[in-house]
Amino acid sequence: MKRVATAAVLIPLVLLAVYLAPFLVLLGLIAIVALLATHEYFSIIKGYGVVPIRSGAYGGIVSLFLLLGLDDSFAFALVVLPTLLASLVLTFILGMRRHDLREASLSIALSYLSVPYIGLTLLSLAFLARTAGSADVLILVFLAVWVGDTAAYYVGRTWGTHKLAPLISPKKTWEGAIASAVFSAIAVLLWAKFVISDSDLRVVPPAIRAAHSSAALAFVFGLIINIAAQFGDLAESMIKRGAGVKDSGTILPGHGGILDRIDALLFAAPVALLLFTLLDRYLPAR
């Protein structure tokens, strides 16, 4: 019940933010989520016997989100790589101050991993919101993740018998994974076909128009994004399993921590950004 109650509160809030919040407000909200998830990640990697080097990662993530707030996309692209390098150098400098170099090297690696693993992946979600010019793209991504997560949970718990990755996540099953992919694809297909109206086609990106007109393409959209989401879920499970941690936090009743709630999105968002960028580039504008 806690899981359902938490979702019943969170999902409307996310939808309100996506549809009503100005881009800079949405960007700020995503940045806050990224920092909270990074904080939880640092708590997890303590299980590997390291003391996290926080400053370099926090600085890099905050800088990336601040830079995305610039109106000039060229300026943003120009400074992304130097920002990532500066974050890495700072993490190394702070690590070099430690006496145990074996621990320091592992701490540097695990700490800096948070920048691409959490910072860049959530940044890609914000970048998708900025470039798409339509909330419908984000809703498609969320739908593929949320429906898939729900289907995997209930189908896997009820009928699952074949373990998907027993060493990483013993409760996940092939039955749940297949149900997740299929239900996500169907949900995206139905949403693109029936929720997106003909009048919406004038303002949505070309990829959404294509999904509206082609059931097969909409199904493939949902399938690809869901498969990426499932890998994201497994990736976080692997990190937690190695650290001997069950949940990343306790802030969300029934769901664990922030990182537990967004783990699938971390891989789904950049895949969706790549998918829609390519399609919007090669599909006709009208």
Image (tube, grey):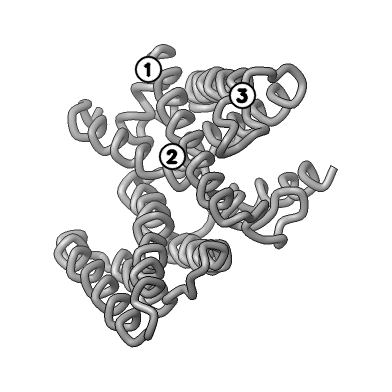
Task: Please give the residue where the numbered disc 3 appears in the rendered image.
Answer: 163
User: If you read the primary sequence from the N terminus, does the residue marked by circle 2 or circle 3 appear first?
Assistant: 3
Place of residue 176 in the rendered image (x, y in percent of width and height, measured from the top left): 63, 23
Res 38 visible: yes
Residue 60 is tagged as none
Separation of residues labelled 3 and 1 (CA atoms): 30 Å
The residue where tag 2 is placed is: 268
Q: Nearer the viewer, residue 71 or 50?
A: 50
Q: For mark 3, does the 10 Å Cα neighbourhood hold few (<14), some (14 to 19), or many (20 or more) residues? A: some
Q: Is residue 153 left or right of residue 264?
A: right
Which secondary structure lies at badge 3?
Answer: strand
**Disc 3 marks which amino acid?**
Lys
Q: Please say if the residues under marks 3 and 1 sit with CB atoms less than 8 Å apart.
A: no
The residue located at (35%, 51%) in the rendering is 124
Task: Mark 3 vs mark 1: give the one in front.
Answer: 3
Residue 269 at x, y percent in the picture: 41, 44
Q: Residues within 10 Å of mark 1 (few under 14, many from 20)?
A: some
Who's the residue at 69% across and 20% down the image?
160
Mark number displayed over residue 217: 1
